Image (cartoon, rainbow, N blue to C red):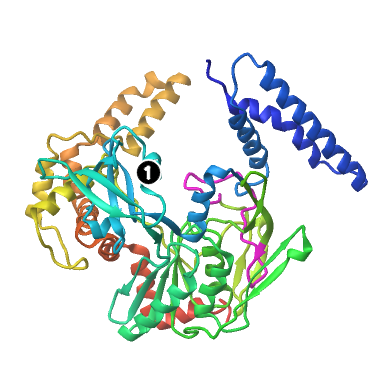
Amino acid sequence: MKNINFKTIGVSVVLVFMLSLVSFDTPNERYFEISKNLDIFSTLFKEVNAYYVDEVNPTQLMKTGIDAMLASLDPYTNYIPEDDIEDYRTMTTGQYGGIGALIGKNNGKNVVIMPYEGFPAHKAGLKVGDEILMVDSIEVTDKNTSEISQLLKGQAKKSLDITVKRYGESKPLTFHLIREKIKIDNVPFYGMVTDDVGYIQLSDFTQGAGKEVSNAVEELKKTGAKKIVLDLRDNPGGLLVEAVNVSNVFVGKGQEVVSTKGKITDWNKSYKTLNTPTDAEIPLAVLTSSRSASAAEIVSGVVQDYDRGILVGEKTFGKGLVQATRPLTYNSQLKVTTAKYYIPSGRCIQAINYSERNEDGSVYKIADSLKVEFETNNGRIVYDGGGVDPDVEVDRSTYAPISLSLVSKGLIFDYATIYYYKHPKISSAADFILSDSEFDEFVTWLSDKEYDYETRVEKTIDNLIEVSKREKYFDNIKDKIEELRQDVQHNKEKDLRQFAPEIKSVLEEEIVARYYLNKGRIEASFDVDPQLQEAIRVLNEREEYDGLLTRADQ
């Protein structure tokens, strides 16, 4: 059978649906057009299935057509077939039946990336770096991560065996596990970053997020926290009600958090805080990134609109749309955008253009002429049109090409595993430092490893050569280009020394993760996190902190 371009066929099939989006004078005309186009769609689908030159997969063809139709609306309206319902529930609830471990590919091998503390994989003794060979009697070396994940998941209290290859062991090891109902914490870490500054990382907004943040604040205050950093970086959002609950930790009872407005006016709603806040006074800094989205943006916007704290980091993602799930036949569902949401100042942070995004998914810079001004409680000027702007803008650290290459080639991961089995104990996660001699050992280990890379400057020179040849300038400048190439051509040995501090910090985090798992990795990153360090600095400068929350002309 020849390969079928389902996307092309699907888009063609579904175009008839789009005719139903035009305006009609009366409801009867609209209903007639919908009925007519559904009839056309049905007969067209049958004709393609019956007479197309090659065999087609009706299910795949239909899904391709549906996906193409919904993609023309916005990125968040999706069709969820029955086979994907369980994954969708896991995403929204944070719960699934499994072993509690993150798995992934490293150098073409399926390995344990991180066992979650206290769950079956961790309790059974699986470790970071273990290569998964078999799940029960099924060999998985040639399977992809998704396929292995499906084998590991299953009904709680059901057993399974996992066979792994472990560094330093001559024979494979087999572990017997009992699956459990896995509930991933919304707050994977909280702790003190200085004597009086507490830190809370919030990674999701599934059920219980507000309670977890509240508990973390209470525990940190008992430990001596007089200021709080709430880390919402890379948080993709989740349940709207949990955005309200997290906001309520820091904002007083009865305050509006968000309102929704859509086509079905009966569904329009204003969400207010319902409880006495955990602490409405403690100085607060919220860390944001270009991947902080949806519910994370609601919380960020609430903190900013009520002048409850400062935002430090990057402009957020720009997703101001609300979705609801609607049941379809055969146990499938439609996740459909039903409204836009508006934060307390009245602004909607949805990107003006759904489709135009930067490489990281964040919104393009919006022209000032397209923005609308709003005011916070204290009269500070804020804008709509694409994400929430930080009060203190701090870019994340960007890694050198050699660091990125060592990570992407799995060499940092592999060496951390070797280090772990050669060193039974290390100091605490916060105090661990790789000595110069230990880093030299790493450099020696790299000597026969492949990790070549191309710097951005080298890529720019290649582009310059291509353009100059196309425009017939190359002969005039080729000597200068070659001289420039020689000047910037990278040397791996030189780069290892030039970027040693950066490479060491990445390696230290990976090594710490072997001993203290995910919590240790987070804690080990604090000293080299410029956004966190800036948040701590501003919190400690009370006059600057108060000034950021005051209107500029006051």
Which x, y percent locates residue 55?
59, 18
Residue 325 counted in the magenta span: no
Vertical order, 188 against 219 (above or below): above
Answer whether residue 389 is visible to the viewer in this image.
no
**Bounds of the magenta span?**
341-364
Q: Nearer the viewer, residue 257 or 475?
A: 257
Residue for badge 1: 151
Task: Say which quarter of the image contains residue 472.
Answer: top left
Q: Nearer the viewer, residue 369 or 82?
A: 82
Q: Residue furthest top?
A: 53
Q: Nearer the viewer, residue 103 or 307?
A: 103
Which x, y percent locates residue 99?
33, 54
Query: In this image, 353 relative to 29: left or right?
Result: left
Vertical order, 244 against 153 (above or below): below
Vertical order, 56 against 53 (above or below): below
What secondary structure predominates along the stretch shown in magenta?
loop
- Rendered residue at 62%/53% (across/down): 367
Task: Say which quarter of the image contains residue 104.
Answer: top left
Give the position of the C terminus as an image quadrant.
Answer: bottom right
At mark 1, the secondary structure is helix
Which x, y percent locates residue 264?
77, 59
Q: Residue furthest left?
A: 437
Q: Amino acid at mark 1?
A: Leu
Residue 357 counted in the magenta span: yes
Which x, y percent locates residue 481?
33, 28
Query: In this image, 344 relative to 520: left or right?
Result: right
Query: In this image, 514 relative to 323: left or right?
Result: left
- Rendered residue at 30%/74% (across/down): 193
Answer whether residue 166 is visible to the viewer in this image.
yes
Query: In this image, 100 relative to 169: left or right?
Result: right
Task: Say which quarter of the image contains residue 491.
Answer: top left
Vertical order, 435 against 25 (above or below): below
